[in-house]
Image (cartoon, grey):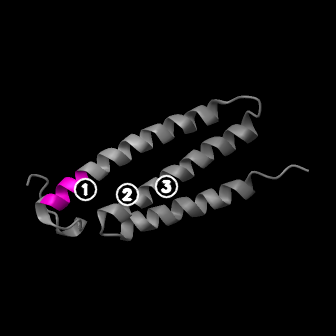
Amino acid sequence: MEISAIYFLVPSLIMFCCGLYGFITRRNMIAMLISLELMLNSVDMNFVIFNRFLFPGQMEGMMFTLFAIAIAAAETALAIAIIINVFRSVNHVDVRELNEMKF
């Protein structure tokens, strides 16, 4: 008996919605970055799920996922560098209080 795709898609949807809610409601840049990573991981799960159920003998979904993970790692490193520079300039990382990017 094969497990249906819905059993994999529902946790991915829940994870994406939690990430979206966290990104919209948080004011801290680090929390927003974590929420964004949660959404990207949900998308990676969808790549693998759809590859498994639509094209079971092929590996394109896995390759897209590995590429997306590499891009997410680079994006995270860049975002953390920006957050550290903002913190050094204004001594907080509250998004609503930042009104200029030039410090």
Q: Is residue 1 above or below residue 25?
A: above
Front-most of 68 and 20? 68
Question: Horizontally, is 95 left or right of 45 in the view?
Answer: left
- Numbered disc total: 3
Question: In the rendered image, which residue does mark 2 sit on?
Answer: 33
Q: Secondary structure at mark 2?
A: helix
Cα separation between marks 3 and 2:
10 Å
Residue at (45%, 62%) from the top-left corner?
A: 20
Question: In the rendered image, which residue does mark 3 sit on?
Answer: 39
Instruction: Tell me whether circle 1 and circle 2 mark residues in contact (CB < 8 Å).
Output: yes
Q: Amino acid at mark 1?
A: Ile
Q: Earlier in the sequence, mark 3 or mark 1?
A: 3
87 drawn magenta: yes
For label 1, the crowd category at 10 Å Cα-Cα, with few meaning under 14, some 14 to 19 and many 20 or more, is some
Question: In the rendered image, which residue does mark 1 sit on?
Answer: 83
Q: Position of residue 65 (x, y in %)?
A: 56, 39
Q: Is residue 98 above or below residue 37?
A: below
Q: Amino acid at mark 2?
A: Leu
Q: Secondary structure at mark 3?
A: helix
